[in-house]
Image (spheres, helix red, strand yellow):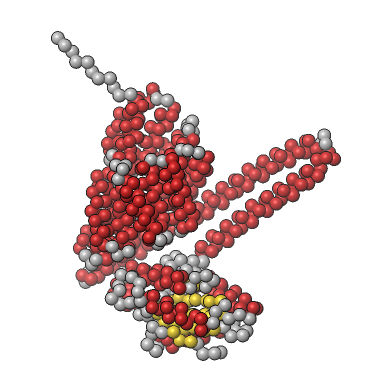
Amino acid sequence: MICAQSADPPSLESQLERVQELNTTAPWRETRALLDEIEPRLGEATPEQRADFWLIRARNQTLAGNMERALGQLEKLFDKPLTRKQEVRAYALAANIAILLRRWEDTFDYLNRALQLAGRLEAAGSSNVPFSLAAYVYAKIGETGQAIDYGQRSVDLARKHGSARDVCINQGRLAFVYKTAEMFELARSHYREAIETCGETGDELVTGTIESGLGDLLRATGDFERAEELFRQALPRLRETDYQFGLGEARFYKARLHWEQGELETTEQLLEQALSPLEDDEAWDYVAEAYGMLSEIETGRGNHEQALAYTRQQLEARERFLDLERARQLAHLQVAFDMRSREQELALLREQQRVSELQAESRRHQDRLRWLAYGFGGFLFLTLTLLLIRVLRERRHFRRLAGLDSLTKLNNHTRFFDSARMMVDKAHHDHSPLVLALGDIDYFKHVNDEFGHIAGDRALKEVARVLRETFPGSANIGRIGGEEFALCLPEETIEYALPRLDALREALEMINYGGNSKPLTMSFGVAELEPDEPLEELRRRADEALYRAKHSGRNSVVIADPD
């Protein structure tokens, strides 16, 4: 009788390598099954292998939606001996989970720890992860310049030390940052490079997410056919990975595409599928936009009661989004301030210890060290003064952010006229010219009524963009009301300003805001500062000129009468 001999079980090391691979290429349920199989064998694992196992387990639970449990496991890991590379992975993953849980102070705390550790890694493939995540977070709070810096650094590190998957992820993240900043050409270039690299990785989740992001970008730039093709590729990939938020976001992006093409039934079906995962993930800006589209669809059908219900849900989601934005900004400020305070306290403690040592030595060398002690006191004072100056500068930076209009990123009413008052005072002092122009979009209410508030918001953003491009440099540009804009142009005369205002009006007629059957036009009232004239009188004259422009046919520039 011949007995078949059973095959030897796979080694723990090979199983860990296998589950690490599945963690990025297979659905989370398949990875979880292998993790459950490995866990009873952890007694034979090294401390480093156990840490790797729990890092993979935490990521798997995150994909499965068990964020609280995943974060709890990571917090236990922080008390264990970890390699520097594992610490970076753990803090970066904890920051990512904290984002999903909307714990913004924890997010910035974990992220800053990960960034500090990653900065000390010389050649570790994972060192790009915190910089990529920081790019995403800073893009979300409107710190575009810092987000681009972090994103470019993450791409450079991934190319130098990482895998094809690292390059794919970081290119996609940088593309998202450029898309958020409305730098569409750079965003498109990085999205395409990311997709080419993703093809080498086999990671369906990342590939589908990036294809979906590029599809939405192409939709925003009018390339509907290519956008549709990308969504046809992305949605099956995301369904296969069972990543509900990614699938919901992709359906929402595709709904935008069909909305702009006037395919309302398809738009409605996609939004109904997308809303639940978007609400679960608290993506309230997307939720508000989705309910806005549904409200306009029901209004077109004559179902005003349902349209009103959707409008209420839109307003509620919008308010939640604003609350979320405020919480995110405040957490960033609080954590940044706390970190600087801790750094200053540590610096002060170190310096105090140093002072004590010098005092002990001075008892032996009193005469020689007295001058050193005085010099050190001056150095300490200078150091603390420089730190205080830096904190005050950053506080001014955050106050500046509060003076911006949230939709157009132009100066708001208060900030505009405060700046204009200083410009007028300077012009009087220097005996230099200054021009104030007040503009109003013609028939803007018709844009909202006929094409919807989404088109109206897009029109306002596009007007702001054209204003910035036409009047760069020292111009003070503001949105001072719903569809009212203002320009304060120092060192300029009306003769120099008028051709540029005419060029501005021509550019406005070319913008795409979703309702281009009726091009946008603006009316302007323009006044040049007279000797010793206060801002209030200058504004009154410009406003009267704008009134005449609005009541003499619109789409014109009227020069104010002298005082």
**Residue drawn at 48 percent across, 46 percent down:** 111
- 472 horizontally vs 249: left or right: right
**Residue drawn at 36 percent across, 43 percent down:** 165
Of all residues, the one furthest to the left in this rendering is 1
Report whether residue 252 is seen: no
Task: State the image coordinates of residue 12 (x, y, percent, origin top left).
Answer: 35, 25
Q: In which quarter of the image is residue 434?
A: bottom right
**Residue drawn at 31 percent across, 36 percent down:** 22
- Please state, as top left, top right, bottom left or bottom right, where the C terminus lies in the image: bottom right
**Residue drawn at 31 percent across, 43 percent down:** 200
- Above or below, comparing residue 277 to residue 203 in the picture: below
Task: State the image coordinates of residue 407 (x, y, percent, origin top left).
Answer: 42, 66
- Above or below, comparing residue 436 to residue 114 in the picture: below
- Above or below, comparing residue 489 to residue 25 in the picture: below
- 9 horizontally vs 491: left or right: left
Q: How many labels does the image show?
A: 0
Task: State the image coordinates of residue 96 (x, y, percent, origin top left).
Answer: 41, 46
Task: State the image coordinates of residue 456 (x, y, percent, origin top left).
Answer: 35, 71
Judge by depth and name the residue closer to the eye, 289 or 192. 192
Q: Quadrant of residue 70?
A: top left
Judge by depth and name the residue closer to the eye, 106 or 115. 115
Report whether residue 354 is seen: yes
- Please state, as top left, top right, bottom left or bottom right, where the N terminus lies in the image: top left
Of all residues, the one furthest to the right in this rendering is 367
- Above or below, comparing residue 116 to residue 476 in the picture: above
